[in-house]
Image: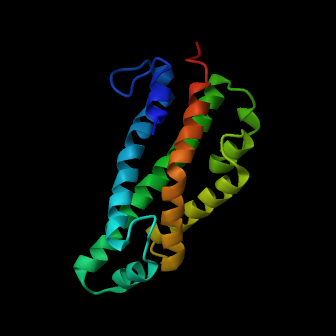
Amino acid sequence: MGTEGQARGRGTSSRGSRPARDGGRQRILEIIDLVPFQHEGLRRALEPFGGANHFDGDAYVAARASRDFGLFDRTALAERYWSVLQTLLRDLAAFGLAEARRLGVHEVRSAGPLFDGLADLGVLSRPDAVRLTEIQAIRNDDQHMYPAEVRRLVQAMLDLDAWVARFMAAYGRWFASWPQSSA
C-alpha cells in the first residue's frame, strides 16, 4: 500500500527497540504493518461470494443464515477479517491523534475524536469520517451480539474494503509530516 514505506522512510522501523518517548510512533508502525495482511484476508474471504467487485449479497445472506457450518464459516471468516481491519483503522486514528498531540502537531489539540478528528485535520474527508464511524458502530453491534442487519453488515464490509487503501495513503502522508520526536 505504500504507507509502510512512507512511515519508515522517516527513519523509523516497525521492529527493534525504541525510546519510551517514541512508543506511540512504534505502536502506530506496528498497526500499519498489520493492515495489509488483514485487508488481504478480507479480500480472500470475500472471494467465495464473488469478491469485492462482483459480490453476491444474496449468496452471503443465505450462507450467514445457513445451518451448514461450511457455509456459515465462510461468512464468519469474512466478518472476522473485517472486524479486525476496522479495529486497526480505529486504533490508528486513536493512537495517531494521541501521538500527534504529544508531539505538538499543528491544530491537533482542537481536533475531535477518532475519524472525526482526522476529518477535522483534513486527513479524511468528512463523508469518509462519517461512514467510517457508522462502520465502527455496525462492527460494535455485531461484536456485542446485537445482530446487525446482514445487508447493512455486508455493505460495511464492502465499503471498508474499498476505503482501506485511500485511508492508509492519507494517514501515511499525515504520519510522515510529524516531527521525528520531542525532547
Q: Residue at x 40, y 35 (%)?
A: 30
Q: Which one is nearer the viewer's eye here, 60 or 102?
A: 60
The x and y percentages for residue 62 are 37, 85
Instruction: Tell me: 25 left or right of 63.
Output: right
The x and y percentages for residue 180 are 55, 18
Q: Quadrant of the N terminus?
A: top left
Instruction: Tell me: 89 left or right of 16.
Output: right
Would you place residue 144 above or below residue 170 in this image? below
Total tally of numbered discs in the picture? 0
Would you place residue 19 above or below residue 113 in this image? above
The x and y percentages for residue 96 are 57, 36
Q: Quadrant of residue 177?
A: top right
Instruction: Tell me: 37 left or right of 20.
Output: left
Q: Which one is nearer the viewer's eye here, 170 or 87?
A: 170
Q: Residue at x 61, y 19 (%)?
A: 179
What color scheme is it?
A: rainbow
Q: Residue at x 63, y 49 (%)?
A: 115
The x and y percentages for residue 178 are 61, 24
Q: Quadrant of the C terminus?
A: top right
Work out which residue is located at the far front of the displayed protein and give it.
54
Would you place residue 127 above or below residue 169 in this image? below
Q: Which one is nearer the viewer's eye here, 2 or 181?
A: 2
Instruction: Tell me: 90 left or right of 121.
Output: left
